[in-house]
Image: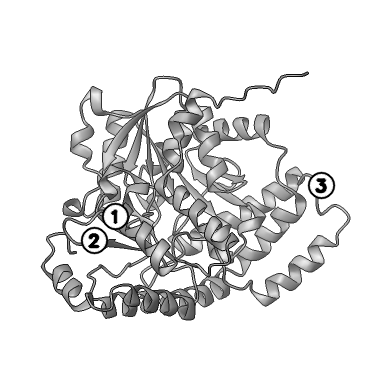
Amino acid sequence: MMRKVIVDSSERLQQVGPTSLIELEQLKRRMLARGADVLDLGRFNPDLPQDVQLQETMQRLVAQPDAFRPASASLHSQFCLEVSRWFADRFGVRINPLRSILPTAGVKEAVHHLTLALVNPGDKVGIPDPSYPLYRAATILVGGVILPVPLIRANEFLPNLARMDSVNTRPRLLFLNYPHNPTSRPPDRSFYIELVRWARKHNVIVVQDFAYGELYYDNEPPMSILAIPGARKVAIELHSLSFTYNLAGLKLGFAVGHPEILSLLEQAQMRLTSGLSTFALDTGICAIKAYGRIASANNKMYVERRDAVSAGLDDLGWTYRRPQAGGFFWVPVPRRRNDERLARRLLSRARVLIAPGTAFGEEGAGYLRISVCASPQHIRAAFQRMAKLWPQKLTAMRKKWARSDSRE
């Protein structure tokens, strides 16, 4: 009789571990399997319809005989040239398409490839807290040492750079993500000026994840860090076509900035992936050319969704800050309430999935993250369910929320 092979996960994978949001996602799947109707406001998975003209173009491109062959060098150059034109129009920044732009298979893949290319075992990596768990996982998997960078409300969810001035608290590489997931905070120009000055002084590489950069409200587009003089000497910025063009499954993005960092990123990509297809880059070129039309239409719909979440929170009596950009509301829970227990109760009792703040780090304790990635009808239905969860206690809860020290 043959013995079953014992399979144990690596220590690094164990260190990454599941987050409370993943555990809630697993509970949601079990509930769906039992026939429950769960309304999901926990994640941001682009669900807006694709632009009709772009969809027609994609149908033509996919029929080409070389659609799924590796893209040629000339097509790579065309894509980078289109990105440089868009960058100049969008941010007023001129970028060298040959040296300072690199196509990627999306932000998540680029982050993993960057840590492989830049981080040695034992190197300190600055990880915002709270933040999307990706940066922490990528650092652990290459043997880097996590240096938590607290982002607190009192400092507008921006890192305190002065606290990282000493050798012991200074990272080799610093990840940032603005507009920020989970708080949706977009920084202003003065912060970026200070950041670039600090990074150049201390020889710190800055990686700015700009995945939510084209999702904004009230006609206030977030700025690029590369608009700051000297930024290209210390930083690269990661862009994604997933959210801007509703092309999540295409797995396409680009990195912009420091040429030597991009060269190392390209080397990692060439060793670990098979490269991008002709179809992906052709689609990317056509999408970027249609940026004005597509981004404007998307943001109009996201404004409706943001307003639906605001109305739902108002009806519950919860306090919050309306996001300026990004895909989330970062909502403080009442004092003495636990965000994980509250999120679990909302899922099990109201059948509404909302992310607990602790899924994004220790500094996320006491918050809930609510996604705008759902139709207004879906959002309204979710808040109606939440209101019914405490029908007798709703007035008392509203008063408690109003007195809470954790209010925005």
**Which of the pair 11/205 is nearer the observer?**
11
Question: In the figure, 319 relative to 339: above or below?
Answer: below
In space, the residues marked 2 and 3 are separated at their CA atoms by 50 Å
Residue 128 badge: none
Decide which of tag 2 and tag 1 comes sooner along the chain: 2
- State the scheme by which the image is colored: one colour
Q: Which residue lies at the image location 28% right of the left edge and 80% below the top edge?
A: 315
Q: Nearer the viewer, mark 2 or mark 3?
A: 2
| Rendering quarter of residue 370 | bottom left
Question: In the figure, 194 relative to 168: above or below?
Answer: below
Percent position of residue 283, x then y: 70, 60
Question: In the figure, 144 relative to 307: above or below?
Answer: above
Residue 339 badge: 1
Percent position of residue 126, x then y: 34, 35
Q: Nearer the viewer, mark 3 or mark 1?
A: 1
Say which quadrant the N terminus sits in.
top right
Q: Secondary structure at mark 2?
A: loop
Instruction: Tell me whether the residue at label 2 lies in contact with that at label 1, contact meaning CB atoms closer than 8 angstroms.
Output: yes
Percent position of residue 142, x then y: 49, 26
Percent position of residue 219, x then y: 38, 74
Q: Which residue lies at the image location 57% right of the left edge and 25% below the top edge?
A: 8
| Rendering quarter of residue 165 | top left
* Total numbered labels: 3
Using the rendered image of the protein, determine whether residue 15 is visible from the camera's viewpoint: yes
Q: Secondary structure at mark 1?
A: helix
Please name the residue that numbered disc 3 is placed on.
69
Tag 2: amino acid: Val
Q: Secondary structure at mark 3?
A: loop
In space, the residues marked 2 and 1 are separated at their CA atoms by 7 Å
Q: Which residue lies at the image location 54% right of the left edge and 72% below the top edge?
A: 292
Please name the residue that numbered disc 2 is placed on.
333
